[in-house]
Amino acid sequence: MSQSTGGENDNGNLKGKKRTRRPIYVSATREHVGKTTTSLALISGLQKRFPKKIGYLKPVGQRHVEVHSDELNTKIRVDKDVALMRERCNLQHIDYRYMSPVLIPQGYTKDYIDGKISHAEQLYAIQEAVANISNCSDVVICEGTGHCGVGSIVGASNARVASLTNSTMVLVANGGLGSCFDELELNRILCKHHSVDVAGVIVNKVLPEKYEQTKDYLSRALMNTWDVPLLGCIPDKPYLGCPALADLENLLESKLINGGKHRFRHYTLDSMCLVTTSLPTFLKMLRKKPSQTLYVCHVTRDDIILGFLAEFQRRKRLQLTKPFEAALIVCGESENYSLTKELRAMLSTQDEDVPLIICPYTTDQAMDKIHSMTPKLNISDSERVNAATDHYEKYIDYDLLLSRTGNVN
């Protein structure tokens, strides 16, 4: 919901407020292209170049969490990415109340269409937030939600908000040539419709073996067609797309019943192994496969579950120095299939080194969910957040970005 109220003047600017710097609005061509990671890297890189502060907000958010506003001295809800950015980037000079001015929870769209939500108040809340953050920051990063058209049904698309706040747009897309350019064109047209300047493009997840080719051809295509530069070309780093056990907890709606201290251990999709073999074959598998393997079995396979536990105990007893970092997901817990009370009690009292999740989904459903998921940055997953920031930052041309957006150091 909107968290501030007020009014606009005739040209849509906040009354009595003037900004000398233009915010940088980061929008994607679609979901899951690395927009939040890009925003995180932009803030990190800009913090090294400006002596004062870097501002950040997400004008229109969706998934939200509860935080404490110091200015309001109460708890409010903000977009989940706002909590990540404020804590990770140490943006304590900005109060939460300005960082997520408009939220669109379930039912918001219907209320807007029914006239229960004021369009003017909604836009004013965004303008007030940008003005307040601009006043205490050298450069302001506005992170959009999805592609440039997201939010159109409530009159607050990324392109519309960028225009309202006099921002310059940075478009983020996934690597490639033809499909990448096509997606960028659709979003550029919407920016043009709202008279929003596109400062440049950042392309993520480029195949390393095609990095130089993609960078060369896409740079020329952007300049020749739109006179817009490629601000960054980021080679793919598979680790950043590997889910942690914490991601799997959320995905499968089931908490680790053991091994909680390894919640942020990551597993590649290639390491996932569905166990349908006999116990002797499984035990051989445990000793031959890479240590950091994610195993999946059905809840009726007591032998596999006990064999998994026994392997941990065997390695502990032999005092093997090589770490054993396997995890087990037990699927199919339901009214028809369930662990015995005795086995469940045994599992809950195991050593904390044994990561184990029991979920209600079938093995097929769990495998499909895991393969189709896109892990998101988590404020508590400092290892992946740091790795993402370090990786992205070195491939972005900050000087070109600043010159294109009018933010001169």
Image (cartoon, helix red, strand yellow):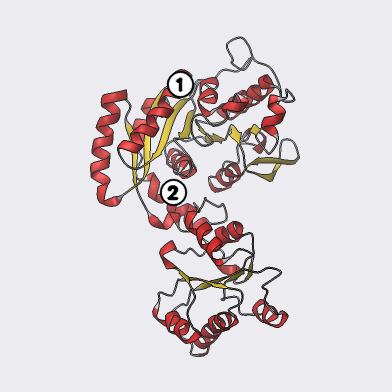
Image quadrant where residue 268 sits = bottom left
Task: Give left or right: position of 132 versus 74.
Answer: left
Q: Which residue is mark 2?
A: 389
Query: Please, what is the three-letter code of the amino acid marked with disc 1?
Result: Val
- Quarter of the figure with residue 239: bottom left
Q: Nearer the viewer, mark 1 or mark 2?
A: 1
Q: Position of residue 243 (x, y in %)?
A: 50, 59
Look at the image and tell me whether residue 2 can be seen.
Answer: no
Between marks 1 and 2, how big is the CA–CA gap? 27 Å
In the displayed structure, does residue 333 sit left or right of residue 173? right
Q: Is residue 205 left or right of residue 73?
A: left
- Looking at the image, which residue sits at the far top? 10
Q: Residue at x 46, y 24 (%)?
A: 190
Query: Helix or strand or loop: what does disc 1 sit on?
Result: loop
Look at the image and tell me whether residue 14 can be seen: yes
Give the answer, above or below, for where 25 lies relative to 319. above
Q: Position of residue 140 (x, y in %)?
A: 51, 31
Residue 96 % position (x, y): 65, 38
Q: Name the amino acid, label 2.
A: Thr
Residue picked out by circle 1: 196
Between 92 and 145, the one nearer to me in the picture: 145
Q: Earlier in the sequence, mark 1 or mark 2?
A: 1
Report the quarter where the C terminus lies.
Answer: top left
Q: Is residue 125 above or below residue 214?
A: above
Front residue of 408 and 220: 220
